[in-house]
Image: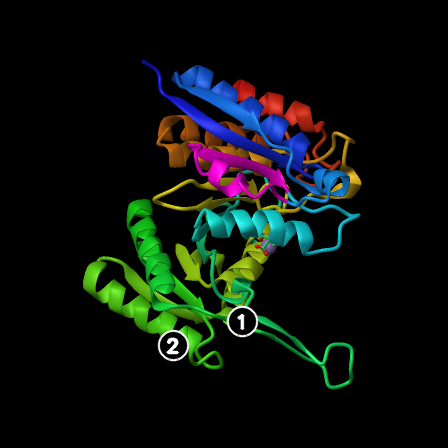
Amino acid sequence: MSQTYNIAVLPGDGTGPEVVVEGVKVLDAAAAKFGFKLNYQYYDFGGDRYLATGEVLPENAPTELGTYDAIFLGAIGHPDVKPGILEKGILLKLRFELDQYINLRPVKLFPGVPTPLKDKGPEHIDYVVVRENTGGLYTGIGGFTMKGTPDEVAVQSMVYNRKQVERAVRYAFEYTRKRNKKNTLALCGKTNVLTYVYDLWERVFHEVGRADFPDIKREYYHVDATCMWMVKNPEWFDVIVTGNMFGDIITDLGAITQGGMGIAAGGNINPFGVSMFEPIGGSAPKYTGLGVINPLAAICSGQMMLDHLGETEAAAAVEKSVMYVTANKLKGMGAGKMGHSTSQVGDMVAEGV
Ligand code: IPM
Ligand code: MN
């Protein structure tokens, strides 16, 4: 009997729906070829629904989404909605409520993809950032006092407990071992200034590594230096583990080195629950409906979802097909620069699976 997976699909805002169509096209091609079934249930959460109903996310949504095998998301963010409302109310809310405590972001340069890094190619840019995804500055602890006066104070605290740090670090060690490339895990922190939070991270990192992962080499970089080496010597990296805010920032840098937001994929992972896969870029509203947006980030997120579901052969086939397309078919990665429309790129990848 063939395996069936139930997938919640959240196309979201802007170009999200367009890239999701292509992601689903490729997922279906993989399912047909490798003999499993995908059932999709669509949800209209996003800016348009909020503007029409005043509701950001129905109260039961996290619980309901938690009953699926995985979630496939396009993009959240609407030009007519004040920044923060949809991001906090939908994206971050789901990450938190579903306890997706890892944000897994591969930085991999595919063949044929232009990188702004001089003299670097696919052999130099192939590492993974394990971003802690539910704590740190994103906890949202803070507030204003004397708001609107010259004495106004605003506070937003970087909060981590040991359990959060330990589970992220353990995941990263295990991931590094399973990946089995350089068997090197780098902690990205700021122990010279954030002498409480990253002291905790550093102690946990070495304790866990020493006790349970002696086969994995440990390295440490400050976050500012990490940015420098990601540009100058990306080939040094295998797996990087870091807190939520640093992870957010360095993965945009990583994304641009692998060809930009059109191709950078990610997964919000709960290793014991329901995970959510999404392109790491935004909703790119100015390109909505033009058929020019690059769907590869969504397609690669789908590929990560297949891998996560255990359909590893199908996932490998999707990646191979994407690589063939980047190496042989596309002129560029940016919106309107591919030499093909959004759906043509989806067709080419689907046909090659
Ligand atoms: C990301 C995004 C989000 C984040 C925003 C939209 C809340 O930048 O997924 O990287 O900061 O995590
Ligand atoms: Mn980000």
Ligand 2 lies in quarter: bottom right
Name the image quarter holding the N terminus.
top left
Pointer 1 residue: 224
What are the residue bounds of the magenta stretch?
A: 57-75
What amino acid is found at the position of numbered circle 2 in the picture? Asp
Which quarter of the picture shows residue 19? top right
User: Quick check: 82 above or below 54?
Assistant: below
Q: Position of residue 317 (x, y in %)?
A: 44, 26
View extreme (top): residue: 1
Residue 81 horizontal side relative to residue 28, left or right:
right
> Does the magenta segment cover residue 102?
no
Pointer 2 residue: 199
| Residue at image point 59% right, 57% down | 253
Residue 86 horizontal side relative to residue 156, left or right:
right
User: Quick check: 152 above or below 187?
Assistant: below
Counting residues from the start of the chain, the first of labels 1 and 2 encountered is 2
> Does the magenta segment cover residue 69?
yes
Q: Position of residue 251 (x, y in %)?
A: 54, 55
